[in-house]
């Protein structure tokens, strides 16, 4: 045992006191320490991926005895590795972006920098642990660890009515987590274990442990809790304000990394443990996803506040993830998980771009007061263009392949079941992409083209701590758009293990 995975979550845990103490000397530059420490976790995960590829199963696990839950396990496999690498990369780059951005939010108080970066590292710990977990109780523990620091990050450094907004965010997501916990506890009680592999094996050996009616109820409870996390229509009330009023680095991390973990959990837990029950409910989920896609895009089209536009866009993109999962095909599942990555790089780019512009315009977020920035911020404008193309699913970006796969899954499901309803859903899903193109191109035109405003006279390119993350994410977006096979092949293999060929 090499202890790579336990190291990947111990590093952010140890980083909490390290960044807090170092802030007294470094102030805003503490962000560089947080970024460097996050890079260690990223390196450990890359090394783990190399180790996993040496096994025939492609799976690398570490197990530690913990008497309250049995086994505290950490696993890297075809499903979790790309997600983990995405999270670790986003955490590293956004910590760097935080250095210039949080300077104008915090000022010169070193203790506030220590608090911000301590919460930031704890937040990253929760995300990594959630994806690595092999035990349902362990998963829930890390799932809740994500919630607490993100609440304080919004409450302390957010904008507007941040106290009310952070409280609404906490209540919505915590209630969702509690409903998910009900499904976890019922599963553990009826199968005699909360270890995910043991639950699957016990149900395969003795299907009568849980009746079909109870399975549907458990899947309904789990999906309700996870749909709150991925902000599906009707359960999305927390998202627009939380994204718009959070400090922009946290908005970037919420949108690119945390929210989509709910989609990962649907695959890892719900579809793996209860595949037939999820398939039974999948037509309902497909329609729900379609409504989310259209509603989020339509709301984004009418926004003038650029952060609120990206908030509704994120909601729409989460609808794409559920759309692919609801096809219950290997193409749809792999497309949804690749959509997590394409959304992460695109939204990471776009929220960092917004942060760069807000720094230049003293916090201004109204697109109608911008314009003509392409010539003054060429790197930022180029990155924004690439991020928007990925969001639209343009060829040569990773967004093209994610949408191609999940829509292909939709048509495969429609034709295999000969369902008029499924065909209509699949066709309308493709139509929804036109709305994404509409609000993306409209925002680009308003911000970067057209006549310059009086406020933009002194605008200049963002500092390197912002342009470097933008360039890295733009390169990843294009690279995965040209050569996505290493990632897609992993997702397809895992999808086939759940739903078949």
Image: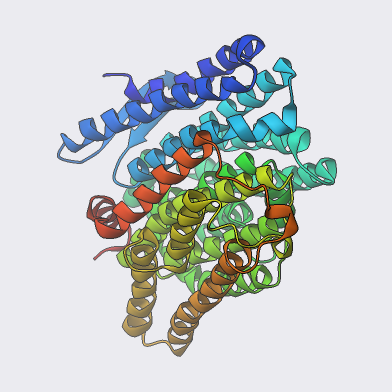
Image quarter in which the C terminus is found: bottom left
Count the numbered circles shown.
0
Residue 456 shows in the view: yes
Q: Is residue 174 left or right of residue 408?
A: right
Image quarter in which the N terminus is found: top left
Residue at 47%, 60% (x, y): give it: 385
Residue 236 shows in the view: no
Q: Is residue 70 left or right of residue 254?
A: left
Residue 369 found in image quarter = bottom right
Residue 466 vertical position relative to residue 277 in the rendered view, above or below: above
Residue 308 found in image quarter = bottom right
Image location (x, y in percent) of residue 9: 45, 24
Residue 464 vertical position relative to residue 67 in the rendered view, above or below: below
Residue 330 found in image quarter = bottom left
Image location (x, y in percent) of residue 223: 56, 57
Query: Which one is in front, 277 or 334?
Result: 334
Residue at 62%, 58% (x, y): give it: 310
Query: Which one is in front, 405 or 358?
Result: 358
Query: Which one is in front, 285 or 8?
Result: 8
Q: How is the image coloured?
A: rainbow
Image location (x, y in percent) of residue 391: 47, 63
Image location (x, y in percent) of residue 283: 49, 75
Q: Is residue 268 left or right of residue 314?
A: left
Residue at 36%, 61% (x, y): give it: 397
């Amino acid at each position: 045992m090499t202890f790579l995975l336990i190291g990947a979550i111990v590093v952010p845990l140890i980083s909490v006191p390290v960044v807090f103490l170092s802030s007294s000397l470094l102030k805003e530059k503490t962000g560089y320490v947080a970024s460097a420490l996050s890079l260690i976790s990223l390196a450990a995960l890359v090394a783990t991926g190399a180790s996993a590829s040496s096994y025939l199963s492609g799976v690398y696990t570490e197990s530690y005895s913990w008497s309250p839950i049995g086994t505290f396990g950490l696993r890297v496999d075809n499903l979790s590795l790309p997600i983990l690498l995405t999270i670790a990369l986003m955490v590293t780059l956004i910590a760097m972006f935080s250095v210039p951005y949080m300077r104008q939010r915090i000022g010169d108080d070193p203790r506030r920098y220590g608090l911000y970066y301590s919460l930031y590292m704890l937040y990253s710990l929760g995300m990594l642990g959630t994806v690595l977990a092999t035990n349902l109780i362990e998963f829930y523990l890390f799932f809740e660890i994500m919630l607490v620091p993100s609440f304080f990050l919004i409450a302390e450094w957010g904008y507007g009515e941040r106290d009310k907004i952070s409280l609404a965010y906490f209540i919505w997501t915590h209630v969702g987590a509690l409903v998910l916990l009900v499904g976890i506890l019922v599963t553990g009680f009826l199968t005699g274990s909360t270890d995910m592999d043991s639950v699957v094996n016990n149900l395969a050996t003795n299907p009568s442990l849980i009746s079909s009616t109870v399975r549907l109820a458990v899947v309904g409870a789990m999906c309700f809790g996870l749909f709150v996390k991925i902000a599906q229509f009707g359960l999305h009330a927390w998202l627009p304000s939380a994204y718009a009023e959070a400090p922009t680095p946290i908005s970037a991390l919420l949108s690119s990394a945390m929210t989509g973990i709910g989609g990962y959990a649907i695959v890892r837990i719900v579809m793996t443990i209860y595949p037939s029950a999820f398939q039974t409910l999948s037509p309902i989920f497909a329609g729900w996803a379609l409504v989310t896609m259209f509603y989020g895009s339509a709301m984004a089209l009418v926004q003038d506040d650029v952060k609120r536009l990206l908030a509704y866009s994120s909601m729409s993109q989460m609808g794409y993830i559920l759309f692919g999962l609801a096809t219950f095909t290997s193409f749809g599942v792999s497309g949804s998980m690749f959509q997590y990555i394409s959304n992460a790089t695109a939204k990471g780019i776009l929220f960092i771009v917004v942060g760069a512009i807000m720094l230049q315009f003293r916090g201004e977020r109204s697109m109608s007061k911008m314009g003509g920035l392409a010539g003054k911020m060429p790197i930022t404008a180029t990155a924004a263009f690439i991020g928007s193309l990925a969001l639209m699913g343009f060829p040569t970006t990773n967004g093209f392949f994610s949408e191609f796969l999940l829509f292909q899954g939709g048509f495969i499901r429609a034709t295999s079941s000969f369902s008029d309803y499924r065909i209509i859903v699949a066709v309308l899903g493709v139509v929804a992409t036109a709305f994404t193109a509409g609000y993306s191109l409209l925002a680009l035109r308003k911000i970067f083209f057209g006549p310059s405003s009086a406020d933009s006279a002194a605008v200049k390119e963002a500092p390197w701590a912002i342009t470097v993350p933008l360039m890295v994410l733009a390169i990843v977006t294009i690279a995965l758009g040209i050569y996505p096979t290493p990632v897609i092949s992993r997702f397809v293999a895992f999808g086939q293990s759940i739903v078949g060929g």
